[in-house]
Image: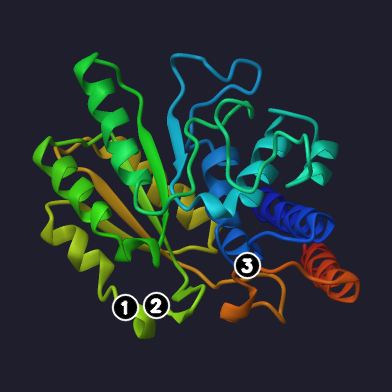
Amino acid sequence: MTELERRATEMRADIVRMIAEAGSGHPGGSLSCADILAALYFGGVLEHDPENPEWEGRDRFILAKGHAAPALYAALAQAGYFPTDELATLRKLGSRLQGHPDSNQVPGVEVSTGSLGQGLSIAAGAAAGLKLDGKPQAVFALLGDGECQEGQVWEAAMFAAHRGLDNLVAVVDRNGLQIDGRTCDVCDPGDLGAKFAAFGWDVTEVDGHDASALVEVLGAAKAARAGKPHAVIARTVKGKGVPFMENEAGWHGKAPNAEQTADALAALEGAEGKEACRG
């Protein structure tokens, strides 16, 4: 198991534990994007400084799919933005780790998100602002594929291409499921890569669970600066890493019970141990 794979597996275990402790949350879409966040935060893609979250030289990351906050919290805790034992306070009264990320309370959170469809607009505005100020930093936004049913996503896509925001990278967690079932049955978003391309974006598709490929693709998208924003369509599995959650829409927004939590953690620990033996 590579370092990035280990990071993602540990994040998944943190996700399961914190949602189980909270008794509520969104495991499916948090588990599906763990590798993406591991590549960004630990693969050398994202310029950031846990010791100085407001550092002007940082790249910006915006979690448009704000309900996947457990994945972001797991990444930030591992990176050193706050103590890992604070993860157990998810969604509890008085905790700064709310069900959706709060930029006023949590270091490392750029924007309070959760209202789906708005994240890419915020990211485009941030990218435009950096351009106007002549600054070189990049802006990354992580969207859900169900979120791409929102019209505001495409208004933002049109604006970003029109303004030539080549410092903007949109990553779509393409796991094919949303709270009500398969995205193709609820309101089929079709070929998302082709749609972004039609709006004037450069597009790359990647296995969203291949850590090394993610680092390469995300790094290249950040570096391209070819006059166009870049969309990365990451093919993922909802509930990745927990067999009974994988590809099950019912795990979009419910917490595992004690027995399920134990089974999930055993599966994750078993995967890590199996890879260690192979190594």
- The amino acid type of the residue labelled 1 equals Cys
Q: Quadrant of residue 238?
A: bottom right
Q: Residue 213 at x, y = what percent?
A: 46, 57
Residue extending furthest toward the bottom? 185
Which of disc 1 and disc 3 is earlier in sequence? Answer: 1
Up/down of 233 relative to 167, above or below: below
Up/down of 149 relative to 38, above or below: below
Q: CA distance from mark 3 to mark 2?
A: 16 Å
Q: CA distance from mark 1 to mark 2?
A: 6 Å
Q: Is residue 37 left or right of residue 148?
A: right
- Pointer 1 residue: 187
Q: Quadrant of residue 246?
A: bottom right
- The amino acid type of the residue labelled 3 equals Gly
**What residue sits 62% from the left and 26% below the top?**
107
**221 or 124, nearer to the observer:** 124
Q: Secondary structure at mark 2?
A: helix
**258 or 59, nearer to the observer:** 258
Q: Secondary structure at mark 1?
A: helix
Q: Is residue 89 left or right of residue 169?
A: right
Q: Secondary structure at mark 3?
A: loop
Which of disc 2 and disc 3 is earlier in sequence? Answer: 2
Label for residue 183? 2
**What residue sits 58% from the left and 46% below the top?**
100
Q: Is residue 115 left or right of residue 131?
A: right
**175 or 210, nearer to the observer:** 175
Label for residue 18? none
**214 or 50, nearer to the observer:** 50
- Pointer 3 residue: 253
**What residue sits 54% from the left and 64% below the top?**
209
